[in-house]
């Protein structure tokens, strides 16, 4: 009887190498897509809703500044909830360019 350890070990090593390569390619693809998601290439132009800025506060928690038409909103975002923290009305002439939050307008009372 011949030994089966040689060919079966070689096939196992080939399988493990191929599997590791596929996993590495999937991880690289996921990383690349995550990087591209925030790039200007995927940003919608001409829409009425615009994400101006985000700031991480804690793991899975962040603040987001959003412009919708003539208003800006400061939102608190957690995995299970989005809460409006503040709201401002902006005049079209006073609106800073996208991404420029140096001149924040005064808050307007809710309702």
Image: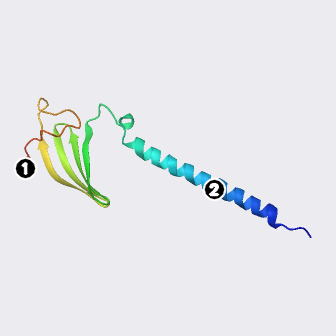
Q: Position of residue 64 (x, y in %)?
A: 24, 49
- Residue at 16% from the left image edge and 41% from the top image edge: 71
Farthest top residue in view: 93
Q: CA distance from mark 2 to mark 1?
A: 57 Å
Farthest right residue in view: 1
Viewer-closest of 13 and 105? 13
SS for tag 2? helix
Q: Quadrant of the N terminus?
A: bottom right
Relative horizontal placement of residue 13, taking residue 51 as reference (left or right) = right
- Residue at 12% from the left image edge and 37% from the top image edge: 90
SS for tag 1? loop
- Residue marked by disc 1: 109
Viewer-closest of 3 and 93? 3
**How many C-alpha atoms fall within 10 Å of the one at disc 1: few (<14), some, or many (≥20)?**
few
Relative horizontal placement of residue 43, taking residue 108 as reference (left or right) = right
- Residue marked by disc 2: 19
Image-quadrant location for residue 72: top left
**How many C-alpha atoms fall within 10 Å of the one at disc 2: few (<14), some, or many (≥20)?**
few
Residue 53 shows which numbered tag?
none
Q: Position of residue 13 (x, y in %)?
A: 70, 59
Viewer-closest of 42 and 4? 4
Relative horizontal placement of residue 13, taking residue 97 as reference (left or right) = right
Q: Earlier in the sequence, mark 2 or mark 1?
A: 2
- Which label lies toward us, 2 or 1? 2
Relative horizontal placement of residue 100, taking residue 35 as reference (left or right) = left
- Residue at 38% from the left image edge and 37% from the top image edge: 42
């Amino acid at each position: 009887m011949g030994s089966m350890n040689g060919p079966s070990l070689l096939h196992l090593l080939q399988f493990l190498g191929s599997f590791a390569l596929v996993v590495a390619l999937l991880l690289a693809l996921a990383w690349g897509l995550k990087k591209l998601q925030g790039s200007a290439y995927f940003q919608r132009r001409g829409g009425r809703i615009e994400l101006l800025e985000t700031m991480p506060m804690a793991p899975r928690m962040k603040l987001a500044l959003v412009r919708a038409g003539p208003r800006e909103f400061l939102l608190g975002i957690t995995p299970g909830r989005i809460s409006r923290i503040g709201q401002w009305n902006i005049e079209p002439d006073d609106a800073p360019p996208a991404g420029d939050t140096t001149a924040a307008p005064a808050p307007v009372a809710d309702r």
